[in-house]
Image: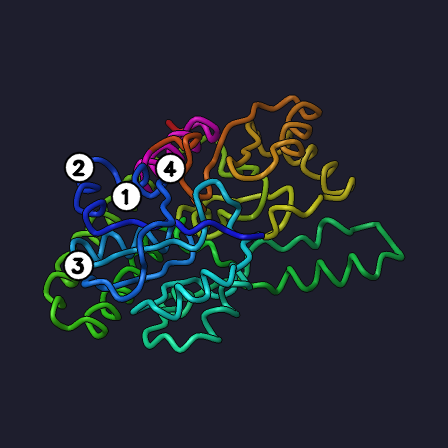
Amino acid sequence: MNVRRRLISATAVTAATALGLGALSACSSDSAATGNTDKFDVVASFYPMAFLAEQIGGDHANVTSLTEPGQEPHDLEISTKQRAQLEEADAALYLKGLQPAVDEAVSQTGIKTKIDAAGLTRLEDHGSTEHDHEGEEGHAEEKGHAEEEEHARDPHIWLDPVKYAEVAEGVGKAFEKADPDHAADYKKNTAALVEKLNGLNGEFENGLKDTKTKVFFTNHAAFGYLAERYGLTQEAISGLDPESEPSAARVRELQQEAKADGVTTVFYETLVSDKTAKTLARDAKLKTDVLDPLEGITDKSRGDDYFQVMEANLKALQAALGAK
């Protein structure tokens, strides 16, 4: 698959302060050159990384995302054109473990500054699907897959504002080192972003501290860090892989748990199929709503940038959990 490049000019970044970065991030262009500009050229793997680069880089950075708006990032394949784009860039910002094609491409380039967001905070194990295979004997292949996923490191760190802030601080330091002429501005921009993320964390803490239930159902296990941060329990229909199909045993288990824990809502996403989530909701007589894993901003997103969509996620969780 030839993935079209999304280029965000420094002029667009400046305008984004007033207009919202997410809307601008949805624009694409093949006409602009990524490398060898008079800006600090950063290639980001997907939206949460591009957002950090835009916010921290400000007027000095020319940010490009390898994943176009609306594309499921896990499915990304790197084109020859994008490999050349990486070679020309001053820095690559990616999240190792989320997009294997990006990991491979970055490792094979001679780019001087390679920033792995996964190395800037602590990754945990989330999204175990061992329940999927209880009572199903003779499925050695499925069991092996479940055990493999059970021990996978969850890459969805941007959905925890505290961890995202830790990553932002690391990215800011990397920008300062790679482009020392503008280090003071990168430091200032990083501090402003971290302060805003700390404020978002406070909103989630206050908004979710008193709820009727602490359990929520999601399409796939993207919200483990968020749940852990705010004392909630995420129950995923699938595991860390959004395309995996749940077993009949897992679906029955969720139906029983919904009754036991007072679950009202099954959340689905904007970038993957909602069929399984809506089927479970119908069979268990539950409502459905969107909880956005923020892997990309599209015209279906409930907001134009990271902060707006996260605030929409907070409202959706408050409604589903019965916040008082």
- Mark 1 nearby-residue class (10 Å; few <14, some 14–19, many ≥20): some
Q: Quadrant of the C terminus?
A: top left
The amino acid pointed to by label 1 is Leu
Name the spot of residue 282 as percent of width and height, x first. Answer: 67, 23
Please tell me whether the stretch drawn in magenta is mainly helix, strand or loop: helix
Q: Secondary structure at mark 2?
A: helix
| Residue at (32, 35) in percent of width and height | 304
| Lower position in the chain sequence, tag 1 or tag 3 | 3
**What is the C-alpha distance between the residues marked 1 and 4?**
12 Å
Closest to the observer: 42 or 301?
42
Q: Amino acid at mark 3?
A: His
Q: Residue 60's mark?
A: 3
Q: Secondary structure at mark 4?
A: helix
Residue identifier under label 2: 18
In the rendered structure, does residue 314 fall within the stretch colored magenta? yes
Q: Is residue 37 magenta?
A: no
| Mark 2 vs 3, N-terminal side | 2
Label 2 and label 3: CA atoms lie apart by 17 Å
97 or 312: which is nearer to us? 97
Going by the numbered disc 2, the residue's amino acid type is Ala
Q: Nearer the viewer, mark 4 or mark 2?
A: 2
Q: Residue furthest front?
A: 31
Q: Is 80 situated above or below 305?
A: below
Q: Position of residue 292 (x, y in %)?
A: 46, 38
Residue numbers of the magenta segment: 304-322
User: Does the rendering let one see residue 206?
Assistant: no
Q: Which residue is mark 4?
A: 208
Cβ atoms at labels 1 and 2 below 8 Å apart: no
Return the mark for residue 200. 1
